[in-house]
Image (cartoon, rainbow, N blue to C red):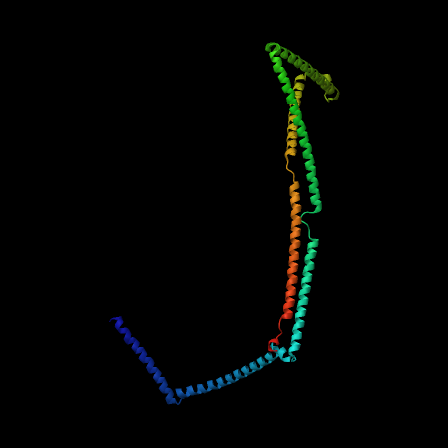
Amino acid sequence: MDSSQSEPALGSTQWHGEMRSHVKDRMGGLIKGEPSWESKIQVQKEKKMQAMKILEKEQRESIKASVEKGLRKQQMYSPLQALRQAPHLSVAEKQAMKLEERKRDMAEKEGAFAEWRSEVLEKQRTREPLFKVDDVTAAKAALEEAAKKRRYELEAEEKKRWEHLEECAVRGCHKRESLYDLHNSIPFEERLAAACKKKTEEMQEMEKEQKERIRNAVASGHKKSQTESPWVEALRLAKPDNSERQKTILDEKNKQMSVTMRTYFKERDAMHERQRTREPLFSNADVSNAAQQLVEKAKKMKGELRTEQEKQMAHIDQLKNKSLERPMLMEKYW
C-alpha cells in the first residue's frame, strides 16, 4: 500500500481523537456543576477592573503631587520671581538706574584701556633691542681693526709691487745697455767663455765654503759624540769605522730638515694668503643698514601706537556721545 495515501487518514484519526476527548472533558465538567466559561470571564473582568481603578487612583495622586511640586518650584526658581518681588519704580527712576549702569560700564572700560595702555608703554620702554649697543660697538671696532689691517696689507703689497716695478725698470735699463753693448762689444763666444769662467770661479768658491762648513760640522759632531756619547768607553776599547753610518744619518737628517722647512714655508704662505683674502664678519654697510632699520622700525611702531591710541580715544568719545544721545526706554511715549 502507498504511504502517500495512508498519511491523511492517520492525521484525520488523531484530530478526531483529540476533539472527542475535549468534548468529553467539557461535558463532564458541566455535568459535575462547575461554573461556565462566561461566568469565569466575568469574574476575571471584575478583578481586573478593580486593579485598574486602584492603579488609576495611584496615578492621579502621583500626577497631583507632581503638579504641586512644579508649582512650588516655579514660585521658587522662576526668573520672573525677582521681577515680581522688585519694588515698582517710576520711569525717571528706571532711567536714572540705566544711566548709572552705563556710567559704571564706561568707567570700567576706561580703567581697562588705561591699564592696557600703561602695559603697552611699559613693554615698549623695557623691551630688549635687536642689537645691543655693546654688540654694535664691538662690531664697529672689529670692522675698523680689520679695515686697518687690510689697509696695512694693501700698503705693503703696493710697496712690494712698486719695488718690483723699479727692479723691472732697472733690469730693462740693463738689458738695453746689454743690447747696446751687444753690437759694440766682444763676440758672443768670448763673452760666453768669460761668463763661464766667472761662474765656475763662483761655484768653486761656493763649493769650497760648503766643504769647509761640512768639514767643520763633521768635526764638531765627532767631537761632541766622543765627549757626550754613552759609547765612549766602547769606542776606546774598539774603534770601529762608523763613517758610512754617520754619513747616512747626516743625509737623513738633512732630508728631514729640508722637508720640514718646505712644509713650514708652504703652510706659512697658505696662512698668509688666507689672512689676506678672508671676508670680514660684518661690513660697515651692513651695520649702518641694521642701525637705520632699527631706527625706522622704532619710528613706525611709535606711529602705530600713537594712531591706535587716537583710535581708542575717538572710540571712547563716540561711545560717550552715543550713550548720552541715546533715548531712554519711555522717551518715545512722552
Residue 240 against residue 31 in the figure, above or below: above
Q: Is residue 153 or residue 309 the one in the foreground?
A: 309
Q: Is residue 45 or residue 153 the one in the foreground?
A: 153
Q: Quadrant of residue 148?
A: top right
**Residue 185 percent location from the top left of the image:** 62, 10
Q: Quadrant of the N terminus?
A: bottom left
Q: Quadrant of residue 66?
A: bottom right
Residue 206 against residue 274 in the figure, above or below: above
Residue at x 64%, y 19% (from the top left corner)? 173
Residue at x 69%, y 32% (from the top left corner)? 152
Q: Is residue 321 left or right of residue 3?
A: right
Q: Is residue 184 left or right of residue 134?
A: left
**Residue 325 percent location from the top left of the image:** 63, 70
Residue at x 69%, y 35% (from the top left corner)? 149
Q: Is residue 233 visible?
A: no
Q: Is residue 73 or residue 167 the one in the foreground?
A: 167
**Residue 129 percent location from the top left of the image:** 68, 50
Residue 194 against residue 265 in the figure, above or below: above
Q: Which residue appears farthest toward the left when viewing the image? A: 1
